[in-house]
Amino acid sequence: MRGDIEVVTDPTGGVDQPTGVIGAFGDVWFTSIANARLGRVDHASQRIETFADPAGGAALPANLFPAADGRIWFTSLGSDRLGALDPAAPDVAASLRTYADPRLAKPVAIKASLDEHLWFTLRGSNAVGTLDPRTTDPIASLRTFAGPGVDGPSALFVHPGGSVWWVNAGTGTLGTLDSWAPDPAATIRTFGPWPDRGRPRAWAMDAEQRLWVTTQDRPGLLAFDPRRLEGPDAFSWWTDDRLATPDGVWCGDDGALWAADTAANAIVRFDPGADGADRWSSYGAPPEVQGPFDIKSADPADGWLWFTNKEGNSLGRIRTV
């Protein structure tokens, strides 16, 4: 039933502060940031495997995303690199490769656009970058974009309409550019800050292609349609007294927003169609939910969302229907 939680642990101890999570190539994949490993939860057996870079180039892996070249790409915040692995390889660790370039300063978030390019934030250089993973030399296709509207870029989302959005951690604002423009840097814009609505944190998109962002300091959810940004009511915000520090967020197949509330040790649900206090509900408690950080769908048809327990060194999933 809705709110049921199951937890998966690694008996070998290979999971240490898991952060990003994504469903890809039939399994659940995650980053284990504290011990420089990437991990997989086998969909059928629910068994965890983790993989380390034999060359040692994957320090502080933060986020990951499946790409059009058939590999899973990830950001390596501690080694100023991007990395990729082949999920179908007989030896996944041996397939792991990292890519270095002076422009790749502290990469954080990574997503793919409809044209199959990868986009990522570069916290160390206050820039947003992109490359084509399908090329023989992906770094040769690397481009970066900077400007006053990029300040401590962190969480990122690529909208199907072509706009790339990110959180500016330095200013508590949202930044955006047009990925289809001849010069994307010339299209950089910022929105916010909203001191009475908290500081933006992480992204999700609903079935109507509206974007949702968790906020902290004043915890809540910010929502807007990137195709309709004009007017005083373009951005809406909701909060609840039970919220503490909502981080990762995703839209469940029930149409509600589900967020990992780290400090509350809870997974919270927000139903935009409900009224008043009925909009919000909260699930879980330690040790099932222990420092939850990121949350995503692995299979939209199965009714579950997966989340990382950063403090519990485990992966969990919660039923949404």
Image: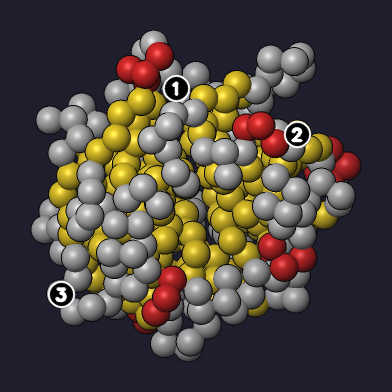
* Badge count: 3
- Left/right placement of residue 192 relative to residue 41 reads right
Which label's residue is closer to the chain start, 1 or 2?
2
In this view of the protein, which residue sits in the foreground, 169 or 303?
169
- The answer to which quarter of the image holds residue 114 is top right
Compared with 30, 34 (above or below) is below
> Would you call the spot at circle 1 few (<14 residues within 10 Å), some (14-19), or many (20 or more)?
few
**Residue 113 visible in the displayed image:** no
The kind of residue tagged 3 is: Pro
- The answer to which quarter of the image holds residue 200 is top right
Gap in angstroms between the C-alphas marked 2 and 3: 45 Å
**Secondary structure of residue under mark 3:** loop
The kind of residue tagged 1 is: Ala
> Would you call the spot at circle 3 few (<14 residues within 10 Å), some (14-19), or many (20 or more)?
few
The kind of residue tagged 2 is: Phe
Q: Which residue is mark 3?
A: 11
**Residue 169 visible in the displayed image:** yes
Gap in angstroms between the C-alphas marked 1 and 3: 38 Å
Name which residue lies at 49% across and 60% down.
63
Q: Quadrant of the C terminus?
A: top left
Rendered location of residue 168, percent (x, y):
70, 49
Any mark on residue 191, and which? 2
Any mark on residue 207, and which? 1
